[in-house]
Image: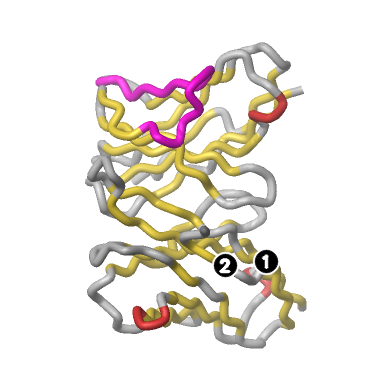
């Protein structure tokens, strides 16, 4: 009965590199959400996906950031050409349906040097 | 304007004291959901409680209790007889319908609770 899994837990990148963050939702959950937490702040919504579909990406920066949730495999949050300001904790959450409780993964701490 | 306000940035208490964490929310929707999550020093987010807007009944779970009052748009969280293991950042969140029709979480900025031995 595994919870939401995220990997890697910690990721270090140099400016200009790409960061790929993975999220496997809880068993039976088909809704995935990504949030970003800057140091000493609350979580901010980025994107909401269902299998193969982006439902709401209103919180995602327009450039360099993309997300997918393929039919098979984990959800991926991709950040291209990272900058220092991308350093944050990125949390993934999943739910069975829209409106239902979201359960969070342990997060990926991204550090951009 | 903040949709979820946690005015207490940091609270320190001595073990065994009771402590209340405040949460005030703002929404125009009649159907919405409120949550509390705990983020211990290890960093993960632990779900504590969910409340829907039609259920104002207060809830108690062990040393934890929640007071939901629509009249004041508040959803406060009380820990009775606090313990050192309660030290964490606590987040209140509101889930309301977005223009897309989906429900999104809006988090408060969190309250850091330090329980001293």
* Residue B6 numbered tag: 2
Mark 1 touches mark 2? (CB < 8 Å): yes
Q: Name the chain letter of the residue that bears numbered label 2.
A: B
The one nearer the camera, B77 or B105, is B105
Query: Can residue B28 be seen by looking at this rendering?
Result: yes
Q: Are marks 1 and 2 on the same chain?
A: yes
The quadrant the C terminus of chain B occupies is: bottom right
Q: Name the chain letter of the residue that bears numbered label 1.
A: B
Answer whether residue B9 is magenta in the image: no
Q: Position of residue A36 (x, y in %)?
A: 54, 39
Q: Position of residue A84 (x, y in %)?
A: 72, 26
Q: Secondary structure at mark 2?
A: loop
Instruction: Please state if A48 lies on the left or on the right of B17 as rendered.
Output: left
Instruction: Please state if A38 lies on the left or on the right of B105 as rendered.
Output: right
Q: Overall secondary structure of the magenta stretch?
A: loop
Residue A68 against residue B25 in the figure, above or below: above
* Residue A24 numbered tag: none
* Residue B9 numbered tag: 1
Q: Residue at x 50, y 27 (%)?
A: A61
The one nearer the camera, B95 or A18, is B95
Task: Specify start and end residues of the magenta stretch as a single range.
Answer: A57-71
Q: Quadrant of residue A14?
A: top right
Q: Residue at x 47, y 26 (%)?
A: A22
Residue B78 against residue A6 in the figure, above or below: below
Q: Secondary structure at mark 1?
A: loop
């Amino acid at each position: 009965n595994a919870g939401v899994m995220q990997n890697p837990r910690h990721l270090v990148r140099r400016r200009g590199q790409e960061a790929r963050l993975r999220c496997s939702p809880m068993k039976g959950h088909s809704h995935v959400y990504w949030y970003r937490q800057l140091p000493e702040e609350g979580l901010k919504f980025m994107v909401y996906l269902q299998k193969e579909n982006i439902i709401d990406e209103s919180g995602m920066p327009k450039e360099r950031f993309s997300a997918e949730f393929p039919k098979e495999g984990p959800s991926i949050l991709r950040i291209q050409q990272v900058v220092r300001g991308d350093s944050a904790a990125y949390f993934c959450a999943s739910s069975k349906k829209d409106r239902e409780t979201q359960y969070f993964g342990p997060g990926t701490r991204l550090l951009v040097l | 304007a903040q949709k979820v306000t946690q005015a207490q940035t940091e609270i320190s208490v001595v073990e065994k004291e009771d402590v209340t964490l405040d949460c005030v929310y703002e929404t125009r929707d009649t159907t919405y959901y409120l949550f509390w999550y705990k983020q211990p020093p290890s960093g993960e987010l632990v779900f504590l409680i969910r409340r829907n807007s039609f259920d104002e009944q207060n809830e108690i779970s062990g040393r934890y209790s929640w007071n939901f009052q629509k009249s004041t748009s508040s959803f406060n969280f009380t820990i009775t007889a606090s313990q050192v293991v309660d030290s964490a950042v606590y987040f209140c969140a509101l889930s309301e319908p977005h223009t897309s029709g989906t429900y999104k979480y809006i988090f408060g900025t969190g309250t850091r609770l330090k329980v001293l031995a």
